[in-house]
Image (cartoon, rainbow, N blue to C red):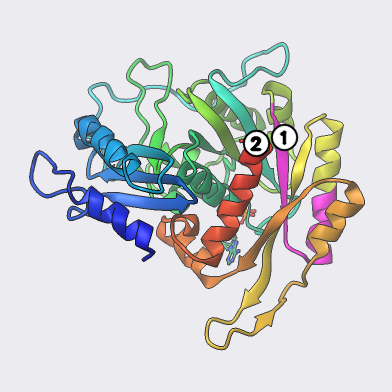
Amino acid sequence: MSEMREKIMGTLSTIALPDGGDLASRDMVRALSVDGGAVSFVIEAPTPEQAAGMETQRRAAEAAVAALDGVERVSVILTAHGPAKPAPQAPNLKIGGHPKPQAGPLPVPGVASVIAIASGKGGVGKSTLSSNLAVALARQGRKVGLLDADILGPSQPRMMGTSQRPSSPDGEQLVPVEAHGVKMMSIGLMLKSDREAVVWRGPMLMGALQQMMFQVDWAPLDVLIIDLPPGTGDVQLTLAQKSQITGAIIVSTPQDVALLDARKAIDMFDKVKVPILGLVENMSTYVCPNCGHEAHLFGHGGVRDEAAELGAPFLGEIPLSLEVRLAGDSGSPAALGDGPVADAYAALARDLVARGIA
Ligand SMILES: Nc1ncnc2c1ncn2[C@@H]1O[C@H](COP(=O)(O)OP(=O)(O)OP(=O)(O)O)[C@@H](O)[C@H]1O
């Protein structure tokens, strides 16, 4: 642990909790990030009820860390790990159904920027990038939302490690679930179990997507990340027609076949006038954890070349790493940790913030 991190954890061990122990000894500090003089972390209480009563401790932690030598900015997010007690009123909002007529693309209220994560081909890592980028941005103090628009194959509940059902106290708006400092919504959270399949026709899907954009209390957010299904189908078109999208990030692996499909996705976004914010190469270099040998299982550099050819920014590369898959499967994205993989996601997030996109 770096000297600064030790100092911060030492300081947090002086913040006592009303029911005994302190923030450090009760293991409530998550996603501690030290980036120059900027420090951010999440205080994760066991339940939403406990989190609601801990604003005093959050403020005290913020002030104590801000007083440390070398610290210029501090951002502390309060969140909860466990399920809430059943909401006083059960959610009675019916998700799905025909989309409501709407004149043109609308802004999502209270959301500064909407970024769609897309690819032409399935399985290249859209959902993994979406969850990790969301967490990396939250670690940098941004207010982040994550919308799982892969309605037929929702994977964000597993990747973000939550199955909490969103509540709708007024029966009109859904309250998004919070995980790792990110507000989240997925059709997967509305299903009775993760084995239940969504069997809906097109209009029902489009209606559900429209509801998840506009009938969820997202505000206030700096950025809403949308994890799209693969391909160039109805969901992508509905999204472009109904909501004002800041832009799309295209994910691809470096193989020719994935790049071919990525080009189709780029072409589709061009047609619907959604700007391409840039391309990301996923599953790039593989570094053997035993001997350090670097291998390029799917090739290397293809996405960078493609971006140059298209005149689109190349946003960076994410290594092929067992840690990424295991972290995704365990519901705790790799970007929450330390090391080269978390650094790669942090660099991507920093770049988007620096360019005023997120
Ligand atoms: N950089 C990486 N290193 C190792 N494994 C990865 C990486 N990125 C993604 N994966 C793994 O590859 C699999 C597919 O990733 P993911 O579900 O994110 O792809 P997707 O494009 O969203 O898929 P779909 O098209 O089904 O929506 C997952 O098991 C994930 O853990």
Residue type at numbered disc 1: Gly
Q: Earlier in the sequence, mark 2 or mark 1?
A: 2
Q: Which residues are magenta?
A: 245-263
| Label 2–label 1 contact, CB within 8 A | yes
Which secondary structure lies at badge 2?
Answer: strand
Closer to the camera in the image, 289 or 65:
65
Closer to the camera in the image, 99 or 136:
136
Residue 106 visible here: yes
Residue highlighted by disc 1: 247
Residue highlighted by disc 2: 115
The spot of residue 96 in percent (x, y) is 53, 28
Name the quadrant of the N terminus: bottom left
Which secondary structure lies at badge 1?
Answer: strand
Residue 280 visible here: no
Q: From the viewer's perspective, tell me whether residue 162 is left or right of residue 108.
A: left
Residue type at numbered disc 2: Ile
- Residue drawn at x 67%, y 23% is 243
The spot of residue 261 in percent (x, y) is 81, 54
